[in-house]
Image: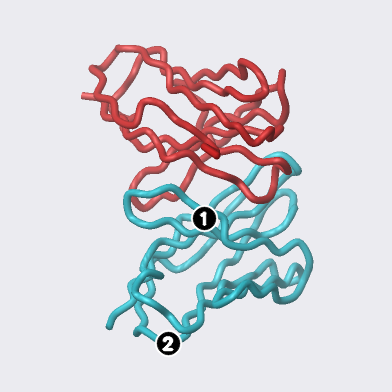
Amino acid sequence: GQSLEQPSEVTAVEGAIVQINCTYQTSGFYGLSWYQQHDGGAPTFLSYNGLDGLEETGRFSSFLSRSDSYGYLLLQELQMKDSASYFCAVGDSSYKLIFGSGTRLLVRP
Amino acid sequence: NAGVTQTPKFQVLKTGQSMTLQCAQDMNHNSMYWYRQDPGMGLRLIYYSASEGTTDKGEVPNGYNVSRLNKREFSLRLESAAPSQTSVYFCASSERGYYGYTFGSGTRLTVV
């Protein structure tokens, strides 16, 4: 079967660093992506890892280990506007993504 | 640059009614998707179209049909709405099927 596991909720303080983990089990693998969704909004693309290692985009970094079927999203210098849900997603074929259930991040002052 | 446009944004249906959700993208993307999002369950794929002229079932296709009208447009039809189809529906498009999806703003559907 196919499954993606990520924590349901994470709380952190403004200015801190937070890591959101994702483990996956899928029939195929075409990379791990991360999406952000604010309440009432649409998901927006954050990052993509096709190969092992770390990808950095400003305050956000994403990591992938294909041998461990594991990845994470790292958010640094947290801001209040980072409060949102974060979804990991795996390309299980070259044509589609399967999404995890999402991690709700609450940033406290 | 509109991106992905969904209509309508809100809809209330009675059980048994039918309706079509419309989606159009102006980015010349090959692939288009319909997802539904329920509280605590993330995004579940209903149907997708890898390229113009093709459609395939996703994780939860029962009760839905789709039409890829042309490269720009991908519609989702509920033939006989049920309360279990109350959800937020998102259309998305992508140049590469596994990467960099652009989502529409969603349709909030309530079936009573």
Residue B6, quarter of the rendered image: top left
In the image, the chain rendered in cyan is A
Tell me if B36 is positioned left or right of A51 in this view.
Answer: left
Image vertical order of residue A15 relative to residue B33, above or below = below
Colouring rule applied to residues = by chain
Could you tell me which residue is drawn at 71 percent across and 32 percent down?
A: B30
Check disc 1 and report its element: helix, strand or loop. loop
x and y percentages locating residue A102 in the rendered image? 45, 59
**Amino acid beneath label 1:** Gly
Check disc 2 and report its element: helix, strand or loop. loop
Image vertical order of residue B82 relative to residue B79, above or below = below
Could you tell me which residue is drawn at 42 percent across and 17 percent down?
A: B20
Tell me if A57 is positioned left or right of B45 in this view.
Answer: right
- Mark found first going from the N terminus, 2 or 1: 2
Chain ID, mark 2: A
Q: Which residue is mark 1?
A: A100
From the image, which quarter does the C terminus of chain B lie in? top left
Q: Residue furthest left?
A: B112
Nearer the camera: disc 2 or disc 1: 2
> Within 10 angstroms of label 2, few (less than 14), some, or many (20 or more) residues?
few
Which residue is at the front of the view, B17 or A4? B17
Residue A93, quarter of the rendered image: top right
Could you tell me which residue is drawn at 36 percent across and 26 percent down?
A: B8
Tell me if B48 is positioned left or right of A100 in this view.
Answer: right
Query: Which label number is shown at residue B97?
Result: none
Q: Which residue is mark 2?
A: A16
In the image, the chain rendered in red is B
x and y percentages locating residue A92 in the rendered image? 69, 48
**Amino acid beneath label 2:** Ala
